[in-house]
Each structure stands twice: as structure tokens, then as C-alpha cells.
Image (cartoon, rainbow, N blue to C red):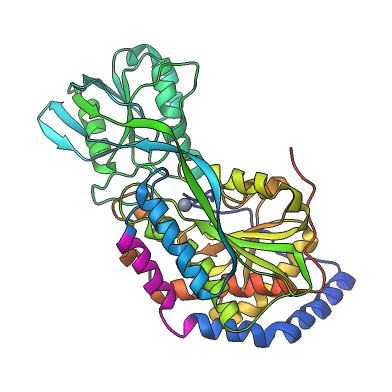
Amino acid sequence: MSLRRVSSLCALLLATAAPAASAQAAAASSDVATSYRAAADSLIRAATADSAAYRRLGRLVDTFGPRISGSASLEAAIDWILDLMKSDGLENVRGEPVMVPHWVRGAESADLVKPRAARLAMLGLGGSVATPKGGITAPVLVVSSLEELNARAADARGKIVLFDVPLTDYPVTRRVRTDGPSAAARAGAVACLIRSVASASIRSPHTGLTRYDSTVRKIPAAALSVEDAMMLHRFQDRGEPIVVTLKMSARTLPDARSRNVVAEIVGREKPDEVVVLGGHIDSWDVGQGAMDDGGGSVAAWEAVRLMHRLGLRPRRTVRVVLWTNEEGGGAGGLAYRDAHAAELPKHVLAMESDNGAFNPKGYVLAGTDSAAAVVQQVAGLLQPINATGVQRVDGSPAADITPLAEAGVATMEVDTDGSRYFWYHHSEGDTLDKLDPAELARCVAAMAVMAYVVADLPDPLPHSAATP
Ligand SMILES: [Zn+2]
């Protein structure tokens, strides 16, 4: 998953400082360029010399497949990564324990009964309850928004409510997936379908987490392909009665043991000050979780492996973290914060790649103006791969580092070309071939240079005030 918006972020240009400040910034900028150009170039060269990251990602996703929280494949993938990190020569390699939700999809189907018999392309939503064994057969009410459901609540009783809402802005459209099922239940619906949250479709349904409001009945919830949702909407517009049979056997089992993967290069002067970089190692249970977020995880891991290989040991500790359970609710990010609470004042930056390891354009930062000025200078070192952009956002740019942002740590996401992200997101289409070896290599370079230089600068990046 990505927290980020599909369309525009609130971008702030940094070139508006007063003349004295900008002279100061120019001096500092040339300092960063002078001090770090050689190290940055060697990291960029090493990252882009071959397809090592892509080969490693291929080995990960082909061997273990998708890695949903609670699954044996996730834990086997974590074991494999921990072993390889040790043989890479990384330090303090460990799995930090996390208890995670354990939802299992089971067999499922959706069949159109009227106005004609047809199998629909569906995927149950993560966390959904099952239908009774024989399924739920009911008339369908199609609505175009949560607001339209509220306006037509009286029509929803006893029906299967279908939200046919096109993806516009992910955090906005996602609300239909998270809040729609309980909104439908409140109106008396017996099940809920949503149009897949996808920007393009070849009749491929896209899953994702739903959240039940504890004050209303839990009803089964699934995504239909964009095409099937639109067809049902057309039937309704023509006045043709629609009946669907939904069968789901999903179960929520007791919480399971998982781990955040952690490995380090210990800082040579200030080992207790930490730069974190990572991705999330769990995925949905369809496709291979290659884009979301195997690519981001491997990019961060490769960045640290290359620093080690090149003998670059920065002043501060560089720590790669592959969080578990991002998709199933973010238990890994919370567990990391809790396990490292005492260290958080000395976390100088937390960077995640969870927007697809596509061509990197730069960085998205949540932090103070002075942190942004430093980051802008470091980003200048990425000129050889054209990844020098710095956009700023309020709040955290990525889910797993949100608890760190709330503790005042400067947080960052690699800003990649997101134009294809929602074609594959949370679907069977999220497989290795959707990423490009050269683009992934440039993501490695972008993470490596930023993490290394921020970890080595004489002064730490400043913190923001913590938010409750
Ligand atoms: Zn993700």
C-alpha cells in the first residue's frame, strides 16, 4: 500500500529563502557536494552497474510468492533474508518479534444470477467475514459514493450494496474500501461490494484492507473488477433488476508471530544516532508482492549491502528495517516504534520506499525547513540519475514510518514515477515483470546516497515537535 496521493502533493519549492540565507545555503550546498560527491558517485556506480537488486528480488518473490501476515511464506521469506543479510556481512542482523493479524481468504466467488448468469471477477477484502456456507443471494443496489448510500439508505435494506466509485485520489477513494462495508451494514445491507481501487484494469480485481465499525454488524465485503462494477451499474441504469450470489469462506485466526527484519552498519563515531531505511516485507496474498513492496524492501537492503561492500561506514548507524504487516494494519511499524522508544530522539531520518520501485525522481519529505534545506543539498548528489527533486508533505509520507513521524523524526519516501502503481496494486498483476531492473537499480542508488550522507553529515537532521 502507499499512503501517498495519486495526484498532486503539496509541493514546496525551497528556492525562496532570503538572500543571506540562500548564500548560506549555497555555501553549505557546496560543502555537501565537495565532501560527498566521491562517495555518492561510487554508490550510484555500484547500484547501477548491474541488475543485482532485480535478481535478488526475483529470487525472493519467485521462491516465496505472496507474503500475507500470518502466512508460512512470509516467515520463510524473512528467514531467507536474515540468512542472506548475515552472509552479506551486515551487523546486528535480527528478527524483532511482532504479533500480527492472521486473516485467511479461503474459497470465494461472486456470481451474477440476474439479469443473466455469469461469473464475476472478485477478490474478498482483507479482514472480511465469511458468508453463510450456501452464500448470500440478494438484489444489488449500486451507488456512486458513500454520500449517495446515505441518501438512499432506505433502499439498501436486505440488499448487496455495490459502491461503483472510480479511483481519483487514493486516500479519498480508499475510504470506500475501509468504511463502505460498515456504512452498508448500518443501512441494513447484507453484503458489500466495491469497485476495485485501480487506475486501469484488464478485469483484474484488487483487494485491500477493510475495517469494521464495532457498533454495527460485520457483513462480507469484496472487490469486483472495474469492468464488472461498471456493468452492474449499467444494468441498474437501464432498470434491469440485478441479483448476485456471493460466497466467501474467509476466517480471522488468532494473531500470529512475525518479525521486523533489522540489520545495520554501526556508526563509526555516533553509533547511537540512527538513520532508518526500509520497505515492508509483507504483501497481499495475490500476485507476488513484487511491486508492493518487495521492490522497496530489496532497494533498501541493497543500499546498505552496497555501502558495506564499498567500505563506507558513516558516522552514524545506518539501519535497514523491513517491516511486517503493513498491509494488515501496520503492526510492524508500531512494534518498531515501541521496541525503540528510548532511541527515537536519536533517530535522525526514517526513509521508506513503498510507492513502487519505479524510476526515482527524488524524495518526499516530512520535516522542518532546516531538515528540508539539508535534504535538498543531499538530493543534488543524485544529479547523475536525475533524482534531485524534493517535495514536502505534512504528516508522514509512508505508513510504516508514520509512528516515527509522530515522534518527531524526519520522514521521507523515495518519490518514484507512480503512473503505473495502481494498475497492479493489491492484484494478481503485482509480479516481478512489472518492475524494471534499471529503474530498481536507480532506487537503490537514491536510497543509498541519501541514507549514507545523512548518516555521515557532521550535524544530525533536526527533529520536528512530536505530535500526539
Ligand atoms: Zn505497500
On screen, residue 415 versus residue 115, left or right, reads: right
Q: Work out which residue is located at the far right of the displayed protein and give it.
A: 20
Residue 443 in view in this figure: no
Residue 51's spot in the image, x, y percent? 40, 79
In the rendered image, the quadrant that contains the C terminus is top right
Front residue (pair 366, 451): 451
Which residue is drawn at the image coordinates 55% and 72% (left, top)? Answer: 303
Residue 87's spot in the image, x, y percent? 49, 73
Does residue 364 lie above or below 207 as drawn? below
Residue 412's spot in the image, x, y percent? 63, 59
Rendering quarter of residue 146: top left
- Residue 34 belongs to magenta span: no
Rendering quarter of residue 187: top left
Residue 164's spot in the image, x, y percent? 34, 34
Task: Provide the residue span drawn in magenta.
Answer: 48-63
Which residue is drawn at the image coordinates 12% and 26% (left, top)? Answer: 115
Secondary structure of the magenta portion, mostly?
A: helix
Does residue 176 lie above or below 170 as drawn? above
Rendering quarter of residue 32: bottom right
Residue 23 in view in this figure: yes
Front residue (pair 9, 354): 354
Q: Work out which residue is located at the far left of the displayed protein and give it.
A: 117
Does residue 352 lie above or below 381 as drawn? above
Q: How many marks?
A: 0
